[in-house]
Image (cartoon, rainbow, N blue to C red):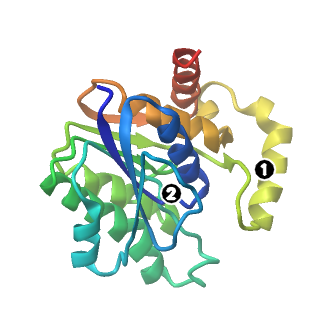
Amino acid sequence: MNDLTAVIIGASGLTGNLVLEELLRDNDFKTVRILVRRTVKIIHPKLEQEIVNFNNLDDYTKKFGEGDVIFCCIGTTQKKVKGDKELYKQIDYDIPINAASIGIANGFKKFLIVSAIGANENSSNFYVSLKGQIENALKQFHFDSLDIFQPSLLNGNRNEKRVLEKMLQGVMDIVSFLFLGPLKKYHAIGADTVAKSMVYAARQNKNGVHYYTYQEMMEMAREYNASKE
């Protein structure tokens, strides 16, 4: 299992960059290919960087290449797209779904994606509904395994300032003791924990569709750390 090729979409973002760092250290992966709009300032013998125009399906397909595992960590915000819901959907929906389509055609066996807690296509909330639509669309592709990670608020050091998110992190830290039992899945989680749990899941021989929320991701990250000691 130590000759896997991974493709990461969203490697310049918070979680995607942490997934990249983990894969470059993981001996099970011999090649890590990132599809990005701009060059990432990392040099590593295992790393392949492909500058992609995600709006050009031919370019996207050409740069994708062959491999085993797809890590999809792409995501935008209303602020970045200036409230344009169609542009938001082009990024959060079209890029992952096109990745799945290309990946199946190119022989990839596993697809892992960062979604969101409460994802439900029938929700009146645009973000929650869109995440649900993405999850359901991905199930139409016949990967050996589809792993869906549903974090609540992500903690970590971003390259960009998100004032509201920072405030929410502070509030969540104060009231975290309230998230017990069924509410535990809404507990804020470190992006590094999500990244480690994704790499851990990619190394498992489990078929089918799997969902992971706070508790599962915490346990998987612990298992991953233990396997590296």
Q: Is residue 166 above or below residue 93?
A: above
Q: In this figure, which residue is indicated by the disc labeled 2?
A: 11
Q: Residues within 10 Å of mark 1 (few under 14, many from 20)?
A: some
- Find residue 137 and report its horizontal and vertical position in percent: 26, 57
The residue that appears at 28% across and 24% down in the rendered structure is: 205
- Find residue 121 and report its horizontal and vertical position in percent: 38, 59
- Find residue 133 and report its horizontal and vertical position in percent: 34, 60
- Find residue 52 and report its horizontal and vertical position in percent: 37, 73
88 and 122: which is toward the camera: 88
Pick whichever of labels 1 and 2 is earlier in the sequence: 2
The residue that appears at 38% across and 36% down in the rendered structure is: 29
10 and 33: which is toward the camera: 33
Q: Please, which residue is most extreme toward the front here? A: 45
Nearer to us of marks 1 and 2 is 2
Query: What amino acid is at disc 2?
Result: Ala
Q: Residue 169 — which label?
A: 1
Q: Can you tell which quarter of the image residue 98 is in?
A: bottom left
- The quadrant in which the C terminus is found is top right
Residue 125 visible, this angle:
no
Task: Kindly state the secondary structure of the residue where label 2 is placed.
Answer: loop
Task: Kindly state the secondary structure of the residue where label 1 is placed.
Answer: helix
